[in-house]
Image: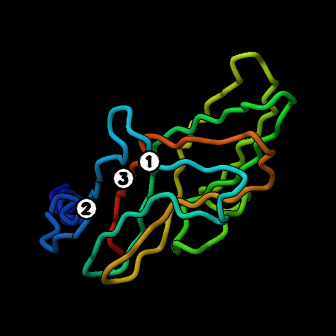
């Protein structure tokens, strides 16, 4: 019986020891653009797309993975006298020049038909997005970009409160 107890204690020892190698896991946050009622960006049919809306930069010593999240909202309006379409694609990307892809990681489509009224019509979109990105050692820049599939005349979209948070796990 003593031998069995020794075997059990020895087998459990690795479960009870502390790992002395510290990992460099980290959380990076930034203040949102346009805090309060301030506007981050305005887009319209005349905007050059794809459009870079927001970036965040951070540095790590070793490669790993990051869960990148973005928060924000967009208010689109139609000031014309006919129904108008706004059809946009957004995505968290690793290049400020990247064209967002609907089915890509962190990609989303925001589409609506805005009917005309005497006072104009508007509707809002939640731009929240998340994706996992492989991170190399050194500085990394993550961006949130938009492209237009269709923006009819007399439409515009105002973007508010864009902010990134990044949870980085080394390894």
Give the quadrant of the N terminus: bottom left
Q: In screen coordinates, is 78 left or right of 152?
A: left
Query: How is the structure coloured here?
Result: rainbow
The reply, left or right, for residue 18 in relation to residue 4 is: left
Residue at image position (25%, 81%) is 61
In this rendering, the label closer to the viewer, 3 or 2 = 3
Q: Secondary structure at mark 3?
A: strand
Q: CA distance from mark 3 to mark 2?
A: 11 Å
In this rendered view, identify the residue nearer to me: 21 or 163.
163
Residue 165, position as x, y percentages in the image? 36, 52
Badge 2, how many Cα within 10 Å: few under 14, some, many 20+? few
Q: Secondary structure at mark 2?
A: strand
For disc 2, the marked residue is 26
User: Residue placed at 87% from the left, 30% from the top?
Assistant: 82
Q: Is residue 79 above or below residue 52?
A: above
Q: Which mark is residue 91?
A: none
Residue 83 image-quadrant placement:
top right
Q: Name the spot of residue 62 as percent of width and height, x first.
A: 30, 81
Choose between 28 and 17: the one closer to the eye: 28
Q: Is residue 45 left or right of residue 70?
A: right
State which quarter of the image contains the C terminus. bottom left
Q: Which residue is mark 3?
A: 165
Inter-mark Cα distance, 1 to 2: 27 Å
Between label 1 and label 2, give the one nearer the viewer: 1
* Front residue of this view, candidates 84 and 28: 84
Quadrant hosting residue 21: bottom left
Image position of 123 with respect to 128: above or below: above
Q: Residue at x 33, y 83 (%)?
A: 137
For label 1, the SS is loop
Of pointers 1 and 2, the one earlier in the residue sequence: 2
Q: Are marks 1 and 2 in contact (CB under 8 Å)?
A: no
The residue indicated by pointer 1 is 40
């Amino acid at each position: 019986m003593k031998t069995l107890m020794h075997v059990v204690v020895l087998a459990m020892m690795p479960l009870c020891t502390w790992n002395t190698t510290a990992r460099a896991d980290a959380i990076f946050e930034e203040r949102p653009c346009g805090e309060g009622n301030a506007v981050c960006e305005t887009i319209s049919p005349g905007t050059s797309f794809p459009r870079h809306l927001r970036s965040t930069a951070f540095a790590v010593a070793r490669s790993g993975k990051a869960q990148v999240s973005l928060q924000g909202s967009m208010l689109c309006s139609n000031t014309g006298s006919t129904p108008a379409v706004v059809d946009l694609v957004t995505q968290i990307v690793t290049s400020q020049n990247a064209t967002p892809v609907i089915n890509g990681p962190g990609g989303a489509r925001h589409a609506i038909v805005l009917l005309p009224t005497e006072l104009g019509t508007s509707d809002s979109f939640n731009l929240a997005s998340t994706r996992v990105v492989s991170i190399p050692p050194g500085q990394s820049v993550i961006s949130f970009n938009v492209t237009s599939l269709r923006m009819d005349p007399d439409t515009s979209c105002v973007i508010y409160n864009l902010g990134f948070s990044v949870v980085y796990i080394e390894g």
